[in-house]
Every structure is written in structure tokens, then in C-alpha cells.
Image (spheres, helix red, strand yellow):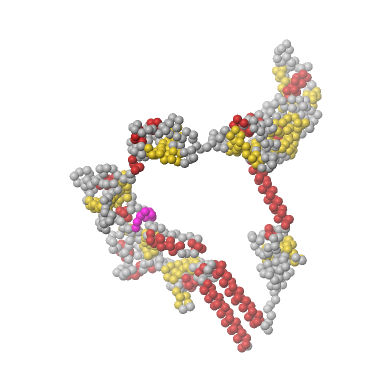
Amino acid sequence: MNLNTFAMYQKNLLNVTFALFLAVSAAFGQGTTPAPSAPAGAPSSTTPSGSQGNGTTQGQSQQQGNTRSVTLPNGQVRQVPVNSQGNVVGPDGQVVQTTTNAQGEVVPVDPQSQTENSLKTAEETANDQKRQARIQAEFAKQELRQSIFGYSLFADSAFSPIPEQSIGTPSDYTIGPGDNLTLSIYGYAQYPDQELEVNRDGDVNILRVGVVNLAGKTIQEAQKILMGRFSKFVPGMLGSGGNASQTKLLLTLGKIRPVNVFVTGEVVRPGSYTLNSLSSAFNALYFAGGPNEIGTFREIRVIRSGKVVSTFDIYDILLNGTSEGAIRIQDNDIVNVGFVKKRIEITGNVRRPKLYEAKGNEKLGDIIRYAGGFTDNAYRARVTIRRISDNGERRILDVKNAEFDNFELVSGDVIEVQAILNRFENIVFLEGAVMRPGDYSIDSNPTLKTLLENAQGLREDAFTGRITVMRTRADQTVQNIPLNLKDIMNGEAEDLLLTRLDRIIIPSNFDMVQPSYVQISGEVNNIEEPEANDPTVVNGPDVAATTNSLRFPYMSNMTLEDLILMGGGFKESAKASQVEVIRRVRNSDAKAADANISEHFEFDVSRDLSLDGNDTNFPLYPFDEVIVRKSPNYQEQQYVILQGEVLNPGQYAIVSKNDKVSDLVMRAGGLTDLAYVKGATLIRSREISEFEAQQTANALGQISTEVRKGSFNVATGGEIRQEFVGIQLEKILKNPDSEENIIIQEGDILSIPKRLETVRVQGALLYPNTVKYSDDMNFLDYISQAGGFTRTSLRRSAYIKYPNGSVDRTRRFLMFNVYPKVEPGSEIYVPVKGAASLTPQQILQQGISITSTLFTLILSVLAFRNIR
């Protein structure tokens, strides 16, 4: 039964019990003093039918007709509809749970889940949907702009469209009102420089010359006019007789005037912009964000005084670096961007797949060139055009290479450039026992014999009695052609004429025999000690001699000493007097019940391994296995650790196989005065067997899904785990001959703490903490010091862990819990009670028990009233 069923049982029992209690209480209250009335301002318990949980109160929410005032989480008070039962409902008709806050306002129950969105009007919901649609449309526009060739230029924030004002004065610059000019005369006759301001009428006032109108004149034209004026009284201004003038006049720009320009049409940000007079029409277009997703890039118009004075093509700027049409703007110029007329998309294997705009006379070849041309692996003989026909359907057109420069495109066409096929028209494959295997051209290798000659012949291990030629037919099926290569090479058989995609495989002699090896295991130097958690290790006292091994390729004339030498020679622990050789049986009688499975040999091998008269000279056969066992008389040092309150803590070697805990304490000089003997612990390292690991995994497989979602450390075979061994050191030291005095093992850690004065209390308690130990306090006293049990405390399962690692649990006697004794340094733990820990029968028993108790109490009260 799941948790929801448990909860339902408990809820039903409580509802029945509570209803019974109310009924009896009502009967009991007849004729007695009335219940006290609610204080002023307190919520009334009367609610409309079906409105429980809505917090509807008299005098605290104003209900008008079929609406009610509700305070939203943002503080707004709004009239919201209510249903026939008086419940607040949203626009979808669903009931919205409400309650009354401290200020007497009706508010949604949970501001995180019952938000203002539940009470929105239909108009607000529609506005939200429109806003979301606008956002999505803007994202779609931005995505389209990113795919248009040329748009990235205007989206580059690092590019500065403002012309540099410190450049030299352009000779074609047109002078206008607001310009500041510098006039310089030098050479034969010299005059001071003059700063000239062009007024609103386009005039400048020049010393000794007077007023001169320069508006609309270029710098070059203005210089000629001034030279004519100054030549009347400045000598050498104009050359005579073909000689150059000796007095020079120079007119340059000083302060550059601002100009207002209007950018209109299909641009990202149309409007009026103030730029300096050196700016071009392209600069103005850049400030406006460039053409938008439906604006043209190919025909940008500059309108001056109602006439188109120039047009320019952004593609010329992007592809050729020229901007002849992007003239310098003047005050009140209009830069206008019209609609795109023909847009083509090119995809696939071109260098720059984008959306391109085509002018009226441009063809397919022009778009391919705009896209940077084909990539290296593009199929150039033909491209595919996807077009929407006049009847509203799509159609595909195949255009050959010769037609690229004449093929007329239609707006909306999609050009697809495919890749070349990953196949070769003249390839054959050579594999196996040849000097140079690989891919070869059939043009220069028309026959098998020619191919092998160009591959520099066969390897020495080549098997020529039968080779394989895998031939791919026209229908792509494969035919196997076996050949005797030896006869072909000797001229006794006809040479094979190769075809495209032939695969020639020359086998090796080694391919037809099982690789031969010999193996050695055990106590040789080149075999490393196995790791404790190595999954290949088998548990047992002779792990290294049975699992780790070295394998070497078999060589003829190999002897036992040769293999031991290849394994690094004997270890000090090796038993050289009993080296075993295990050999496969090749002529066993399969029918005989006592047939040999293997042959076994034992040798006394000299540790010297020298090639002299003392060697065994025992020849090895393929697949022989040599085992060098560990000498039973060889023992490595083993250590234990003694820490804590002894005179000489530290690491101690195990002297005898029978060393016990008391021997270790005595060797350390005994205990100190502060030693707490009852808290002594022994930690022992133990290797987890495969069987134990499998048992643990099987046990976890039977646990419910909820429990298995928790965190468990499941041991695997070969893993080393440290475990507490419960010892009674006090008894051991008093009686060393007792059974409590266990034998110590390698890796043991014996820890003797100082006198402990606290008890740790944790688990399902109000305030888990650490409490000072007292002889006068019992188990429940320590629970009380931690705040006592909670509703989720599983009292009957409370347990205690003593300092020495042993554990004691709570026991039951009749209907009572018998709690364990508490020692200094102990840890008390109270588990959490979960719904899954109660069976349906237990829940039913609890309900019956509660109901019976209430009946008994009610009958007692009624009996007491009758007595009165």
C-alpha cells in the first residue's frame, strides 16, 4: 500500500473521530452555560456553504452582488467574481483559494501559486498574449536580418561611421552656411591668415576684398574666385608668360558645420540625424541601423531639394570597396531606402550562404559570385533551384553549369549547391600481407600482377595459396573471387583484370594460426602486487600466485629458465624448489572417465638462472603456464596501531601469530591515569567478498523505490572496509585468559580515549545536542535535555552506541519501552517515523485505539453529570 493510501486512512479515521467528538460535545453542552462570543473584530466562523478554506468573513470583505473585494499580492484591491457558493473564481471559472490577513483583507492563500495571473481580466490576458506575440515577431525579424548579406556591417558596434575631422580639406567639399574657412596667402607677397565665417546667406567678408558669396561652391572653385579678386592688388598672384605664380593662395576648412539629414523608408531606425558636413550618405544610413528585413541594399537614393541627386549600392562597398554613389550629404538631404524587389537565398556548399538581393539584370552566376563562389567539395556541374510557382505550389529546377550566367531568377528562389559524392571513379583497394597496402588507381594498375608490383611486392609471411578479391558489381552486390596467387605470379594461371572498387585481400600465414604464448604467474619480480579493489583479484591467501600473470609470445627453443628470466627472476619470497609447469593435453582420450585434463611438472630451479649444467633445460611448448609459488616460511612484517591513553602510543609490529589485545597494551607500557577503558575501540580492516557484495545488492533490490532513491554506498568485491569490533578492554586487562582477549590482526587500530564526560543526543528530537554525563540521569533524561520526542520520533526503535562501538536498543516489556543504560561518551539516536513504517493494520489499530479512548472519556463525563 502506498503513502497516499496511508494518508487517506489516517484522515478518514480522524474525521470520524472528530465528528463524533463534536456531536457528543454538542449534546453535553445542552443546558450548560453558553460558549463565550468571539471578540470584536475576530473572524466569524460562519461561512457560505462550500467556502471552507476561502477565509470569507463577515465585515472583512465587501461583497457586492456577484463580486468581492480581494487584495492582490501587489497591494491592489480588485472586485473579482464569486460563484453561487460564495467562492472567489478566476476568469477560467476555477476556484481561487483565499484567506484573511492580519489587516482584515481577503488575499490569495499562496502568493507564489495563486498569483495575480489567476485574477486577471480577459482584457489583460489578451494584452499579455499580444505582447508575447510582438516579442516573438521581433525575434523573428532579428533572425531574418542576421541571414541577410550585408546586415552584419550595420550591426557591428566596433565600426565608427563618423568621418575623421582632422583629415585634409577635400577639394570637392561644398561650402555652405556655418562653415569656418582659413585663408592663407604666402610666397612673393605675404598676408596674415584670415578666419572666414560663412553666414546664413553664404557670404564671407574678406579684408581689402569685401563680401564674396561662396555658398554652393567647392573649395577648388572658391580658391579660383578669391585668386581673381586678390590678383588685382597682390603682385605675383597670377603667373605671366607661362610662368607659375609666385604668390600662393590656400583656402582650408576650419570648423566643420553640422548638417541635418533625414533617413527614411525601410531602415531599422528611421528619423532625423545631425552629422558633420564631411559625412556621406552611407554614414547617415549607418546611424539609422541600415536597411531592415524588407529594405533594399542595392538602390539607396539621396534626395536633395525634391530631386534624386545620387543612388548607391551597398554591395559595391561590401564587395568592391567603392562608394561612388554615397555622396557627401548636405543640409536637409534625404536618404531613402525602398523595398527589396528580388531576394534570393543560396544554401549548401558555397563560401557565404546567405540571403542576397538581385538587381533586375543579374543572373544565377552573379548570386554565386556574391556568395564567394563554390567551396572545394561543391558539386559544380549542376545546382538545384526551389521555386514557388504561380499556382502556389513548389517546384524544382535543375540548372547546369553552362546556363549559370543566363538563368533568370525569381524573388523567393532558393539555390541549393550540393556536395560531391564520397566515391571514386577509378579506385581499387589492396589489403593484407603486402609491402604497401592502400588505395590505388586502376588506370595505372589494370591487372592484379601490376598492382602487386607497384605495391613493392608481397611480405615474407604472405599466404599465396588462396587470396580473396571482393568485386562490387554494377547493382552494388559483392562477388567473391578466390584466386591462387602463387600460380598467377609463376605464370601458370591467367592474370586478373581489375575493375573499379575491387578489394584485394592477401592473407598472412599468421592469420591462420592461433597466436602462441607462454605464461608465468606468482613470485617473479615483474608481476606487481594486486590492488585490494582490483576486480580481477580472487579472494584467498595466495592471490598473487593465482591471479596476476605475465604473458609472452612463444618462441621456439624456449626453456623454463628463459621464461623466469623474462618475468624478472625470482622474488625473495619465491619457492624456487617447487616451480610448476602446466601443459595442455593434445591427445587426451575424450571417452575415458579418467582422461587427463592437463600435464603437470615440478622443478627445483636454481635462483642463479645461469646457463650451466645446473639448469633444468626443460623446453616449453606453446600455451605452457609456469607457476612460482610463495614460500610458506616467508613472512613479511605486519603492523597494528595503538593510539590514545597509553604510555607509548604508535605503530607496533605483530611478533607472534598469537599476539592478543592485552599483549599490545603491555608492550605500550600500560594505560595512563586518564584512560577511559570502557570507551576503548578496535577498528579492523576487512576485505568484502564477492558473495557479501552480491548479498548486499540483492537486499537493496528488495527495498522500495522511495528508499532506493537515497544515497547508499554498496560495497563491491575486493573492497577494504573498516569495521568496529566490540571489545571489553576492562575485562581483558583484568583476565587476559578470557575469551574477550581476541587475537590482533594486521591493520588493526586500537584506540583508548580519555575519560569522557558527555553524551551526544541526536535524531528526531526538538533540539539535538550534546549533554554532560551524569550518573543520576537515565536514557529519557537525556532525551528531555534535547527537547524531548517529536511527533515523528520512532521511540520504540531508539538505540544507543557505546564508546567501544557496541550498540544496544530499546526493548519492549508488556506495553512499556525499556531503554538501555547510558555510559559516558555514548551516542543516543532516535529514528524518524515515516508513513511507510506503518502498515494498514497498524493504522487501523491506532484509529480504533483513539476512538475507544474518546468513547471512554465521553461516557465518563456523562456518568459524572448524572451523578451531579
In the foreground, 605 or 663: 605
In the foreground, 458 or 449: 449
Quarter of the view holding residue 590: bottom left
Q: Where is residue 108 in the image (x, y as percent from the top left)?
A: 67, 63
Q: Position of residue 426 (x, y in %)?
A: 47, 33
Q: Is residue 596 above or below residue 288?
A: below
Q: The C terminus is located in which quarter?
A: bottom right
Residue 139 visible in the snapshot? yes
Residue at 64% across, 37% down: 149
Q: How many labels does the image show?
A: 0
Query: In the rendered structure, does residue 722 fall within the stretch colored magenta?
Result: no
Query: In the rendered structure, does residue 536 fall within the stretch colored magenta?
Result: yes
Q: In this view, does 821 lie above or below 309?
A: below
Residue 101 horizontal side relative to residue 747, left or right: right
Residue 739 horizontal side relative to residue 333, left or right: left
Q: Main secondary structure of the magenta part?
A: loop
Q: Where is residue 707 in the image (x, y as percent from the top left)?
A: 49, 63
Residue 535 horizontal side relative to residue 32, left or right: left
Residue at 56% across, 35% down: 379
Residue at 36% across, 64% down: 672
In the foreground, 11 or 1: 1
Furthest residue in direction left, as rendered: 613
Q: Position of residue 407 (x, y in %)?
A: 64, 32
Residues shaded magenta = 532-539
Quarter of the view holding residue 71: bottom right
Residue 758 visible in the snapshot? no
Residue at 72% across, 66% down: 83
In the foreground, 357 or 174: 357
